[in-house]
Image: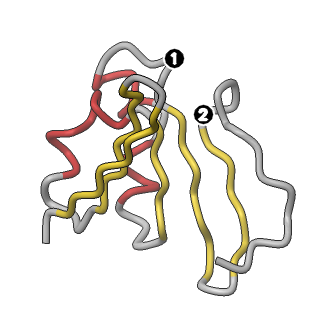
Amino acid sequence: MGVQDEVSSPTFSLVNEYMSSRGVVYHMDLYRLNTEREAFEAGVMEYIDSGEICLIEWPELIASWLSAYPCVVFSLSHEENKRKIEITTNY
C-alpha cells in the first residue's frame, strides 16, 4: 500500500496510523477490549466512519457495526501442518 513507516502491532496503543500512497491507513487491534461500549468509547467508530482504510485485528467484538461497511475479512487458522487463509467479502 506504499507505507514507508515501520509497521507494528497496535496491541497496546489500540490504533496505529500510517500514511500510504492511498491516504491514511488505520491499523487497529481490539484484542484487549471486552465490550462494544469500550470500543465506542475508544473512538473506533470515528476511525471506521472516516472513510479511510481500516485494518482491524480481532474485529469480532464489533462485527455488528461492520455489516454496514464494505469489508474484506481475512481469517487465519492452522490445520495439521498447514496454514489456512479464508477471504470473504460483504459486498
Q: Position of residue 17 (x, y in %)?
A: 68, 57
Q: Residue furthest top?
A: 34
Q: Secondary structure at mark 1?
A: loop
Residue beneath label 2, please? Answer: 14
Q: Is residue 72 left or right of residue 78?
A: left
**Crowd class of label 2 (few under 14; some 14 to 19; many from 20; radius 10 Å):** some
User: Residue 76: x, y in percent?
Assistant: 40, 39
Dot 1: within a 10 Å radius of its alpha carbon, few (fewer than 14), some, or many (20 or more) residues? few
Of 22 and 84, nearer the camera is 84
Q: Amino acid at mark 2?
A: Leu
Q: Classify residue 28 as left or right of residue 6.
A: left
Q: Residue furthest front?
A: 81
Residue pictured at 58% horizontal, 51% vertical? 27
Rendered residue at 36%/51% (across/down): 74
Q: Name the residue at 69% across, 38% down.
A: 9
Q: Is residue 21 above or below residue 34?
A: below
Q: How is the image coloured?
A: secondary structure
Residue 38 % position (x, y): 39, 22
SS at badge 2: loop
User: Could you tell me if the residues under marks 2 and 1 are in contact, i.e. CB atoms within 8 Å?
Assistant: yes
Using the rendered view, name the quadrant where residue 82 is placed: top left
- Compared to residue 66, the image places residue 81 above or below, namely above
Residue 81 vs 22, above or below: the answer is above
Q: Between residues 9 and 68, which one lies in front from this camera angle?
A: 9
Q: Quadrant of the C terminus?
A: bottom left
Within the image, what quadrant is residue 8 found in?
A: top right
The N terminus: image quadrant: bottom right
User: Which amino acid lies under the numbered mark 1 shown in the image of this protein?
Assistant: Arg
Residue 82, compared with residue 66, is above or below; it is: above
Residue at the disc numbered 1:
32
Considering only order in the chain, which callout, 1 or 2, is on the residue closer to the N terminus? 2
* Residue for point 68% across, 86% down: 21
